[in-house]
Image (tube, coloured by chain):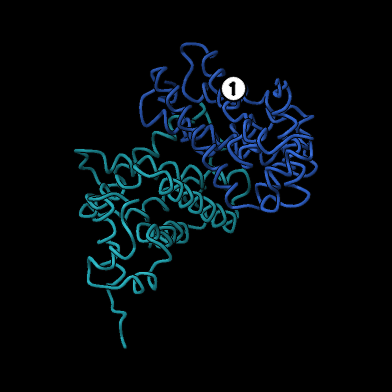
Chain colours: A blue, B cyan
Amino acid sequence: MVRWQPGTNERLQAAALELFASQGYEQTTAAEIAQSVGLTERTFFRHFSDKREALFHGQELLVDAFLAGVAAAPDDAAPMELVGAALESAAQFFPGERRDHSRLRQSVIDQNPALQERERHKMSVLATTLRDALRTRGVTEPAATLAAESAATVFGVSFTQWIAPGETRSIVEIERGVLAELRGLTAVAPAPAARG
Amino acid sequence: MVRWQPGTNERLQAAALELFASQGYEQTTAAEIAQSVGLTERTFFRHFSDKREALFHGQELLVDAFLAGVAAAPDDAAPMELVGAALESAAQFFPGERRDHSRLRQSVIDQNPALQERERHKMSVLATTLRDALRTRGVTEPAATLAAESAATVFGVSFTQWIAPGETRSIVEIERGVLAELRGLTAVAPAPAARG
């Protein structure tokens, strides 16, 4: 009775994305997703609480990647340096060969308000978790929240650019440019108090 | 047959907030809200699509206040100056005498995931609308998105501080401090390119 096998999650996720993209998210059932890869609906629900989660599975790994970047930064890193480190670390999740997958996934999300809400929730969890990690490192408020929200914003803008038609730069290259743009945008002329 | 009267919206909103706070959001029905101010459920639904909207009615006025700040700013205002103008304009919605109301409303939202989601949606609409207004004024991407998201973040952080126990500063005073903190946080040493 060993029904679970390594890779079942990934097969179900790939099948879900394909069906959502080809026939629509609303029109696709968990049973169909499972059947398309020779599994039962019951198996599907052992892996995911609902069909939506087949699109969002693994988000905690992305959050962990942000946190790992913060953890690996030098003790005296300023808040925005921690943000930069978190963004660089998270970039590992988006190698070039994943770009088409990410484009397809985003096109499914863009067509469905419930999925957009789920995506907003994901970004909200990311910002809150990052904020808590910054606080733990001694960053005070409101700096911790501002830095964490900025990280989520820079990531969101960079991701959108990364999946834009014709874009060829890596996400880390885009992130650096967007972060620099944010810094230039918000900079006040002489800012001696900028370093934490 | 003139059933509608000026102030019905406000009475229903006040009654909804009171019942949500005293007996819980989930436990309160639209009919109860209406009855508590001598109206029928049918009247309630002429004013609000559901009980949740009795808590969120008027959000477009808040967005309009942000936009009015942008519209009134000088032609040569830099993106973050537009953000500052938008924040100052929005502050008119939060006079000191509204603070207790805002505290009560937030306590209801904090206890319910569906209301938190609605609040995230509201902030997302605010950021997107503001981004579009900045684009219309000629702010390019990614600056428009970064500035608009920063405005939403500064507003959110400031609002949270404004309703904190014991806080007595006005929201506009708090906003100025948080915006300055963001500018100091993200500033790079000499930033001659900061002005648009």
Please name the residue shown 27% across and 73% down the image.
Answer: B39
- Locate residue A116, reporting x and y percent: 58, 47
Q: Which image quarter holds the N terminus of chain A?
A: top right
Q: Quadrant of residue A62?
A: top right
| A122 or A171: nearer the viewer | A122
Whether residue B175 is visible: no
Q: Which amino acid type corresponds to the residue marked 1 in the rendered image? A: Ala
Q: Is residue B167 left or right of residue A25?
A: left
Above or below for A109 versus B39? above
Q: Is residue A89 visible?
A: yes
Crowding at mark 1 (Cα within 10 Å: few <14, some 14-19, many 20+): many
**Residue closest to the far front:** A1
Residue at horizontal 31 percent and vertical 69 percent from the top: B9
Depth check: A192 or B177 in front? B177
Q: Say above or below: A68 vs A56.
A: above
Residue B117: x and y in percent read 46, 47
Q: Is residue A12 left or right of residue A193?
A: right
Quick one: SS at disc 1? helix
Question: What x and y, as percent, mark residue B124?
Answer: 50, 49
Q: Is residue B8 above or below residue B51?
A: below
> In terms of depth relative to the viewer, which is nearer, B155 or B50?
B50
Choose between B118 and A190: the one closer to the eye: B118
Residue bearing mark 1: A65
What chain does badge 1 belong to?
A
> In which image quadrant can residue A90 be found?
top right
Residue B21 rendering spot, x and y as whole percentages: 25, 50
